[in-house]
Image: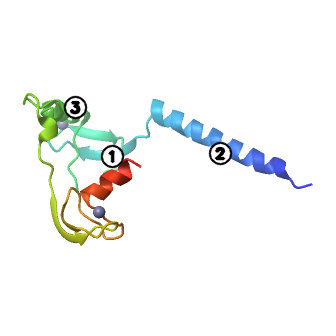
Amino acid sequence: MFPTRSFIYFPNNILEYIRNNIMAFGSDRQMYDVDLTCAKCGAHISQLPFQPSGDRPVYCSDCNRAFRKDRPATDRGGRSGGFSNAPRQMYSVNLSCASCNQQITELPFQPTGDKPVYCRDCMQARRNG
Ligand SMILES: [Zn+2]
Ligand SMILES: [Zn+2]
């Protein structure tokens, strides 16, 4: 007989561990003790929900909240209609389709070089199955 019981027991433990950690993360985030001043209002900051890297300004929770509120809601867009017709940024490339060998001069993304690139027709054909 193989000791299969221990193999079952092990992942059970891991699941419990993960669940405990997720619960801890959701209800009570880990805070780092710091001794910094807010880059905007100069308020003293004694705790942060992340470890400060040192090369970015740190803001107190009030300024953080205000900063988010002040940001324009870009995804609401004031223009009426036609947002789907907005031209996407295209990258100039000089490649050939990995499927039909057609020349490709523009791509809606920057090719990484380690994945095959397909022309629009072949891309659509692949997406449709
Ligand atoms: Zn502040
Ligand atoms: Zn093609």
Identified by mark 2, the residue type is: Ile
Q: Which label is found at residue 14?
A: 2
- The percent coordinates of residue 29 (x first, y second) are 43, 36
Q: Quadrant of residue 45?
A: top left
Lateral position of residue 24 relative to residue 1, left or right:
left
> Distance between the Cα atoms at labels 3 and 1?
19 Å
- The percent coordinates of residue 75 (x first, y second) are 18, 34
- The percent coordinates of residue 77 (x first, y second) are 12, 32
Could one spot residue 121 in this view of the protein? yes
Crowding at label 1, few (<14), some or many (≥20) Cα neighbours within 10 Å?
some
Q: Quadrant of residue 63?
A: top left
* Image quadrant in which the N terminus is located: bottom right
> Distance between the Cα atoms at labels 1 and 2?
32 Å
Crowding at label 3, few (<14), some or many (≥20) Cα neighbours within 10 Å?
few
Residue named by callout 1: 34
Q: Which label is found at residue 61?
A: none
Identified by mark 1, the residue type is: Val
